[in-house]
Image (cartoon, rainbow, N blue to C red):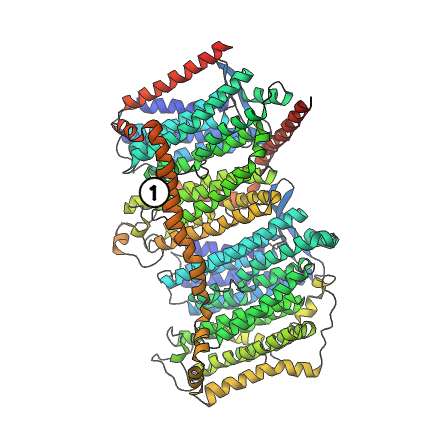
Amino acid sequence: MQLWLIPLLPLAGAAINGFTGRRTSKTVQSMIAVGSVLLSFLWVIKTLMALMPIEERYVEHYFTWMASGALQVGVDLAVDRLTAVMLCVVTGIGTLIHIYATGYMHDEEGYYRFFAYLNLFMFFMLVLVLGGNFLLLFVGWEGVGLCSYLLIGFYFLKKSASDAGKKAFIVNRIGDFGFSLAMFLIVVTFGTLDFPTVFAKVQELPVEHSAGIITAICLLLLVGATGKSAQIPLYVWLPDAMEGPTPVSALIHAATMVTAGVYMCSRSAALFMKAPIAMDTVAIVGLATAVLAATIGLVQNDIKKVYAYSTVSQLGYMFLAVGLGAFSAGIYHLVTHAFFKALLFLGAGSVIHACHHEQDMRHMGGLRKKIPHTFNVLLIAALAIAGFPFMSGWYSKEEILGAAHHHHMWMYWVAWTTAGMTAFYVFRSIFLTFFGEYKGHAHPHESPWTMIGPLYVLAILSVAGGYVFNIPHILEPVFHGIVPEGHTEHSMADMILGTSPGLIGIFLAYIVYAAKPGMADSIKESFSGVYNLLYNKYFVDEIYDATIVHPIERTSRNFLWKVVDAGIIDNGIVHGFSGSAFNFGGLLRHLQSGLIRNYAAWTVVGVVFLLSALTALGGGR
Amino acid sequence: MNLLDLVIAAPLAGFFLTLALPKSNASLIKTFTLIYSIAVFAGSLLLVGTALDRPSAMTWVTDTPWISTPAIRYHVGMDGVSVWLVLLSTFLTPLSILLSWKYIDHRVKEFFAFLLLLEFGLVGVFVSLDLFLFYVFWEICLVPMYFLIGIWGHDRRIYAAVKFFLYTMAGSVLMLAAILYLYNKSGTFDYPAMLTMMQTGKLSLTHLEETLLFLAFFFAFAIKVPLFPLHTWLPDAHVEAPTAGSVMLAAVMLKMGTYGILRFCLPMFPNSSKENANWIIILAIVGIIYGALVAMVQPNMKKLVAYSSVSHLGFVVLGLFSGNQWGLDGAVYQMLNHGISTGALFMLVGFLYERQHSLEIKDYGGVATPAPQLSTVFLVTTLASIGMPMLNNFIGEYLVLQGAAMINIWWAVFAATGVILSACYMLWLYQRTFFGETPESVRHHMHDLGGREWACILPLVALMIWMGVYAQSFLPSIGASNKTILDRTTMTTRAEVANNGR
């Protein structure tokens, strides 16, 4: 089936633009960048058609990447329905965002560099979802992190951008630390990294031997996932990542890369299902992140920051689903979220483009008339994420709420409240941006068709995607036999209850930001303590800096380097020892007189010593 | 006289030939040494095929008497590990010569001659199968490096050179004593013969003897690695050395220590190696973390890379003493990786130095704008160095950590923090050097990579990718050689047990 073409096409695009971009025109660069991803998308479609109905896993082995002792790691690409879903999302949304970016980035310096990175990202993301073993998944995993680093820091003249890129990379590295330890334990336990072998062996393992180690493996995988998918405690990089160009935020930091953790946990469902403690941890981490990020999102003024925290929150929702064993619901939300969150970001990009790089919503307002197309699509996206009935987000959120309802009522109510907050902050952004009076100084203009076109496609998907793509049904064969068959039917009353927070949130946002302007400020005044806490994101960055980053740096500089290295080892021991034994200073002066004669004398002394020693030994025998 | 003998002897001949050239004609000297060293590299490439056919045994063996009393033999050969280290030496020598093309402007003849002498010593170290011969080559390496630092180094070159010399000598003396002691007991310097005697029980060491001998060898090797806390010569040597010296020092000379441990300590003293593994592993892990933390706060680029070497070499030692196939394979692979990626880092720092005449990070900033190609290559090298998958270091680090996890997951936990920290110090260095607005003082000097510089760095970048994507070009032969060493270790242990039981 030539699966390798799927990732290699974007890689080729990246290579061509990377090497020749200095000499080619922007049109050529755009055609290469968009074309390679589009071809990859078409190849995905063709492959999936040919493989239908993909009830079995289809594998292609290319070559052995490394082999040592009993461990063999091959470059294997594999497709099952889970991968198929991911492939469609990644290449489909990827193509749309590439097209959009040709418009959005048109006047930027380093156009070809941007697309080389973006194509490279596609390569690694596709390796991530196609990889047939943990290590190949990890290749994609680290690779997308690299591209994220490069693209967040795309405007590298700005210190804030290069700081944000570095932060993203390092925080992700902390997650990857967990992921690698999980792999070591997997190899120690199962002797291989191949998905099917590991997942088959875990079924055979006697529970009393395996519970501890499987729990450890799953918790470590979770550490990896919290890094990549921006969950507590490693979510701090994602809001900063908004320093990158907006198409990057849409593709990498909303639709695809950040969902890799959800994909990885779902891929490892067989392991997680054997580790109930880890499952509970996943659910709680997800839920806590969903709430925390949503509360922060309520008060941010930067339109991209609002959507960034929203992404963190929605990812928390997906992890909640995963932790509850509702893997397919998690992936369902991953897919619909990819539609509407990509749309939200791209729409926001269109707004920012229109307002000449203004991102602060306090300087917007009244844009509904000025950029009507952008308004239309953003409204659709907002309705979808708020869970307005029969929009895409509604279906997936219902699935997750249903799963929570089934497990723990308290989780259900927390998730329910979060859904309300989601609707509130998203519509807050809509009202602040598009209603009322325009408060900025630019002359907003509608974006070109290369940007608006993809927006409408995504808008259609955001409306109908949930109904058309019945992900839980599609994924049934993947989780069959791993996850116990749960009845997902819920009553009309549940459905109405689940729909209500979204509607309530929209309504409240309307009251506060549209119907009664000024109400927001009075609320802010009366709850200024809470407001400040939220506005400053619970001071988590500051706490991390004060408790981890600065102490490490200070200890390294003032103690390890200056005291241990220079003081104790060098001045104390080395100089002390050599000073007394060889009269270091005197020797220095002698050698400094620097003539070959001296060195020759030294050598002669050495040779004489050796020969006499040998003769003594030889003679002694 | 086979091809290997030629490859060993050629650099020495080249050394003398270079010395015979007229002093005044610098370009002739450079051209001659470059072509000559490329020819040596080509010759060493011809060795590979045979060595890879039977990697578990020694090939290209020559074994003839050298000095009759005491019986010192010229016994050389290569297996699947040493072949790559020889290749690393012969590969980096021409690059170092090319690297110094413009930079070296005084005492040109001696400089290039010394590089060839260094090559002679390095190749000899990696193929010697006679303990005394090994010692001779070991010491020969010391001489040219001492001069490279002491004559062509920066301001504090004499201090650094003497420190380097004394440190290494302190270890070598102990190793020499151990070698002589072994000779006294066995009557031979011949390494395979000695191993056979140990296996058959003809040569048996008491527990105390084995421990002391092990420690004597290990101490000499550990200084060279360098293992924490014996590392403080390294930053000074690197900072003061000329670029080519730093490259050869980091890329090849540090491997003499780890190679010595693999070739001599583990097979000859298997029991001591096992008994002492724990504290050595702890020192290795301390070195990994300590080196990384100290690297993070260095204001000087070369010092930063030097401390990062302490961290990286910690991984190698960790792998060597994990005592399993993964650890050993990873360790050897990591030796080569470190040679490639840190060699490249020193080269790139050298390029920056030649432009800006400073090694202080604060004197840089915004280099990416005037020199995009240099920045890209530096980024790829940085990524290789911090273990990005699909580049070389990842595979070595992965195998080492997997090997460590096999004996104790906590070793892997602590050691793996070094992987996080490596990202911190390298990306911070990269940010401060290459990102941001370009100050006028930088823009003025910072031209992009030239043809000669590309010729130096491109082979290394190609290798980073090759070794990262298709490790199977290298790992099978390394694995086969390591398996022989591992088997011997367990066999010797059994023989010892049998002896003790008798």
> Could you tell me residue A433's position as x and y percent?
44, 81
Q: Quadrant of the C terminus of chain B?
A: top right
> Could you tell me residue A246's position as x and y percent?
45, 68
| For residue A266, side relative to residue B170 (left or right) | right
Residue A564: quarter of image: top left
Up-down: is A180 above or below B317?
below
Q: Is residue B87 visible?
A: no
Q: Circle 1 is placed at which residue position?
A: B350
Three-letter amino acid code at the position of disc 1: Gly
> Could you tell me which secondary element the residue under label 1 belongs to?
helix
| Badge 1: residue crowd in 10 Å (few <14, some 14–19, many ≥20) | many
Judging depth in this view, the residue of B459 and A396 nearest the camera is A396
> Could you tell me residue B13's position as x and y percent?
39, 22
Q: Is residue A477 visible?
A: yes
Judging depth in this view, the residue of A414 and B457 nearest the camera is A414
Judging depth in this view, the residue of B2 and A267 nearest the camera is A267
